[in-house]
Image (cartoon, rainbow, N blue to C red):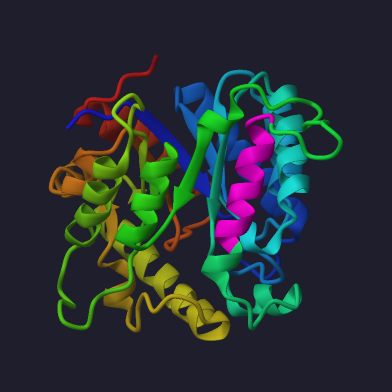
Amino acid sequence: MTIRNLGFFTRLVRTDESEDSATVYRQALEQFDLAERLGYDTAWVAQHHLDPAEGGLPSPFVFLAHAAARNPRIRFGTAIVTLALEDPVRVAEDAAVLDTLSGGRLELGFGAGGSRHAFELFELADADRQQLYAAKLAKVSEALAGAPLVDGRGLNPPATGLRNRLWQATFSASGARRAGLAGDGLLLSKAQPRDPAAPEATLWEIQQPLVDAYLEALPQEVAPRIGASRGVFVADDHDRARAAAERGAVRFLEQLRRNGGPDLAHTVEEVLRDCYIGTPDEVVEQLSADTALLRSTDFIVQVHPVDPGHEATLRSIELIATKVAPQLGWRDR
């Protein structure tokens, strides 16, 4: 296994009722600051609406513009913007501004999914999500590529090169094939719905067909970009890591019951089956068996659904960069 790029991802989740949004945002920025100092290649955020326990960031471009001003080297990504809920031209404009301000450091990830309440919020509860996503993806891709929008006028500022930094997230082989045909990057999730016929399948066994479909569809002249997001929590002590993980899994199950969405888990054990938890050596051993990760270009770590608190998250970020990733072939460039 050789990791080309190491990324850190946060959902900006509130894990304590006493935390306000300002605290959550400040802590996420401090985590990005540490990732920058430790040599991480990318820092990613997700977009969520209304529920701070699911994710605290409805406006990822605003947040990332501030993060980019603090950190001059690391690249920034969206994983994901829920494109079905957005105006594709406004997304292209906001992304172009952020990419310009950051010196071309944006990685732009899209997906069709989102919680039920988010689609209700935008009066799209009965919409065909995949059809809506496909139409908006085509529009934003055209805009970023410089196609004329009105009377021969294209995007301003022009999104130079950003069309080649699009990523698509998916749970399906058909979605992976669509990403490959477009020459986009493929984003693999940290968890995956199980086929009832194969409930014990590992995460990488489920995701191997997605990687295969993507690579088969990718034009020969396009270099593959596969980002494998993984739930990774590393601590100095095994028992403390496991205890924190189980507490986080209980919170995550409550959030799943409240918000709906993909059928990912019903028990603590099912929540944690796709996570890598323990001391550095233990986590290295666990990750070394992940064959989907073996074929990825980008290893993107997140502490969700453990969400152990700010200080423990900072320590995990440090241990991954100094003790885990180097054993898997990653080097701070």
Q: Residue at x 34, y 62 (%)?
A: 172
Q: Nearer the viewer, residue 141 or 120?
A: 141
The image position of residue 99, as x and y in percent, is 68, 28
* 303 up-or-down from 271: above or below: above
Instruction: Identify the residue at image location x=30%, y=63%.
Output: 242
Q: Quadrant of residue 50?
A: bottom right
Establish if 257 lies above or below 189. below
Looking at the rendered structure, the number of numbered marks drawn on it comes to 0
Report the front residue among 315 and 95.
Answer: 95
Relative depth, front residue between 109 and 30 = 109
Up the image or down, 167 lies above or below 80; here it is above
Residue 165 image offset from top left, x and y in percent: 52, 32
Q: Is residue 57 magenta?
A: no
Report if residue 144 lies within the magenta region: yes
Which residue lies most toward the top here? 333
Q: Quadrant of residue 27?
A: top right
> Can you say which quadrant of the picture contains the C terminus?
top left
Does residue 216 appear anywhere in the picture? yes
Range of magenta residues: 133-146
List x then y, in percent, for residue 211: 25, 48
- Image point 79% across, 26% down: which residue? 157
- Residue 12 visible, this angle: no
| Left or right of residue 306: residue 243 | left
Quadrant (top left/top right/bottom left/bottom right) for the N terminus: top left
Quarter-of-image position of residue 304: bottom left
Q: Residue furthest front?
A: 151
Instruction: Return the x and y of residue 91 as percentages of the image width and height.
Output: 72, 46
- Residue at 54% x, 45% y is 109
Q: Taken as a whole, is the magenta stretch helix, strand or loop? A: helix
